[in-house]
Image (cartoon, rainbow, N blue to C red):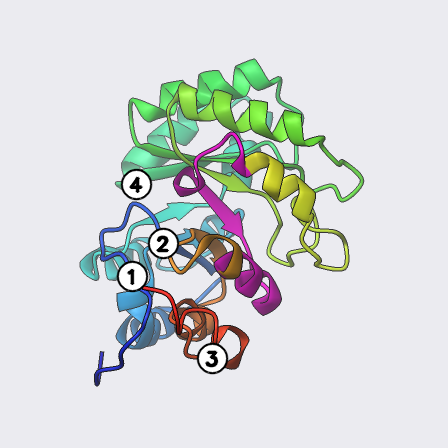
Amino acid sequence: MNYRLNNLPERTVKPRGKGLTMVMDKGLSLREVEDFIEVAGAHADIVKLGWSTSFVTPKLKEKLKLYRDADIPVYFGGTLFEAFVIRNQFDEYQRVLDEYDMRFAEVSDGSIEIPHEVKCQYISKLSEQVTVISEVGSKDEKKIFAPYKWINLMRAEIEAGSWKVIAEAREGGNVGIYRDSGEVRQGLVDEILTQIPEETIIWEAPQKAQQVWFIELIGANVNLGNIAPAEVIPLETIRLGLRGDTFNHFLNKK
């Protein structure tokens, strides 16, 4: 940091096991990635190349190298996994991961129907090759899961080999753990946290109000995902109580 302030919450340090900021790259150019790393790389823990954007991204290997040289893990979005699976090309997906030297992979079923035991088999298989992050929840706003189902799905995927489970919200933050207005389904989150350790969950929270809500609930070191590159530094100030939204939240806490 550039100067000293007292009474700030203690942040975990990279490489973090909790307090992660997962960034959504929806098509940054190489120059934009360089600028992002220069300004916010110290606060970014892992980058997702959103949905299947890696398929059409020019100079993909060069982009991946920029992130890796900055010690920022990067992975392809779960929709790409689904695109391979629905076409019966899972083996080819594994080869793509190797070709691009990917160390992480996302397993999701937000766009297609996969029996959950089969999804867990994919998680188990991929966990022998890479570190797996799996996503729970549908991208269809009409599909609302009961809390017990979220818990059962998350628990099974962790047991199958997932390092972290993502609570689905899409890049807009208006499905899954949120209502279509963006409001948090508070009862759902509270119920999940009675059974699933908070450090194993990445809550997708693209909207500032959602970020504030989770930081006030869980603390500065909550795992948050789908953060826009330009919002990484603003998010860090919210985590530290240095923005109006959380300014008083940490002042009297050690």
Q: Against 236, is 202 above or below?
A: above
Q: Quadrant of residue 95?
A: top left
Magenta-colored span: 193-215
Disc 1 crowd rating (10 Å Cα; few below 14, some 14-19, many 20+) is some
Toward the viewer: 59 or 192?
A: 192
Distance CA(mark 2)–CA(mark 4): 23 Å
Name the kind of residue labelled 1 in the image. Answer: Arg
User: Residue, x 53% and y 62% (percent of image)?
Assistant: 211
The residue identified by callout 2 is 19
Rendering coords of residue 91 (x, y %):
41, 22
Q: Against 147, is 100 above or below?
A: below
The residue identified by callout 4 is 102
Disc 4 crowd rating (10 Å Cα; few below 14, some 14-19, many 20+) is some
Toward the viewer: 162 or 125?
A: 162
The residue identified by callout 3 is 243
In the rendered structure, does residue 133 fall within the stretch colored magenta?
no
Name the kind of residue labelled 2 in the image. Answer: Gly
In the rendered structure, does residue 200 fall within the stretch colored magenta?
yes
Q: Earlier in the sequence, mark 3 or mark 4?
A: 4
Q: Is residue 106 visible?
A: yes
Q: Earlier in the sequence, mark 1 or mark 2?
A: 1
Q: Which mark is residue 219?
A: none
